[in-house]
Amino acid sequence: MIHFQSEQAMIDFGEKLAGLLFPGSILTLEGELGAGKTTFTKGIGKGLGIKKVINSPTFTIVKVYQGKLPLYHFDAYRLEGQDEELGFEEMFEDEGVCVIEWPIYIQDILPSEKLEIQILKNEDESRSMILKPHGEKYEKIVKELGLC
């Protein structure tokens, strides 16, 4: 478990993580509203060299940003109970990085290999993060971050 005392610390960690990601990376972000999922994604975007402002894709479901690798930023919150074909699988198989907020709502279509990230909002307003790798590539990332 990692602890962050500030938003900037979360952004910095996201930037560091981005340097270890590869084409086709899948990251899922779980956490209550206001936990810092989008803040963390801003750091990933920064690490991928994205200059545009990254904000929540709540109403568009997915936003695409161009950097060293494309960043597909999903917010699946509004997809609860939907079972129509949305075309996300094509993005999961693309050369970009997929960051998925509220993955529980599309878990049936998510690849088995991914990096699950849980963000916890602590009583003192700090944040904690738990990384759970699924697959060798993601285990390597967690190891390189010194978290194993």
Image (cartoon, helix red, strand yellow):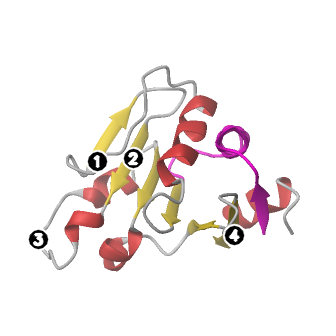
Asked whether the beta carbons under mark 2 and mark 1 sit within 8 Å of each other, the answer is: yes
Tag in front: 2 or 3? 2
| Residue position marked by numbered label 3 in the rendering | 84
Tag in front: 3 or 4? 4
- For marks 2 and 3, the one nearer the N-term is 2
Give the residue type at disc 2: His
Asked whether the beta carbons under mark 1 and mark 4 sit within 8 Å of each other, the answer is: no
| Residue position marked by numbered label 4 in the rendering | 130
Does residue 34 appear to the left or right of 5 in the view shown?
A: left
Does residue 90 appear to the left or right of 26 in the view shown?
A: left
- For marks 4 and 2, the one nearer the N-term is 2
Q: Residue furthest top?
A: 51
| Residue position marked by numbered label 2 in the rendering | 73
Query: Which contiguous range is marked in magenta?
Result: 1-25
Give the residue type at disc 3: Glu
Horizontal and vertical percent position of residue 31: 51, 68
- Marks 2/1: CA–CA distance: 5 Å
Circle 4 Cα neighbour tier, 10 Å, few/some/many (<14 / 14–19 / ≥20): some
| Residue position marked by numbered label 1 in the rendering | 62
- For marks 1 and 4, the one nearer the N-term is 1
- For marks 3 and 4, the one nearer the N-term is 3
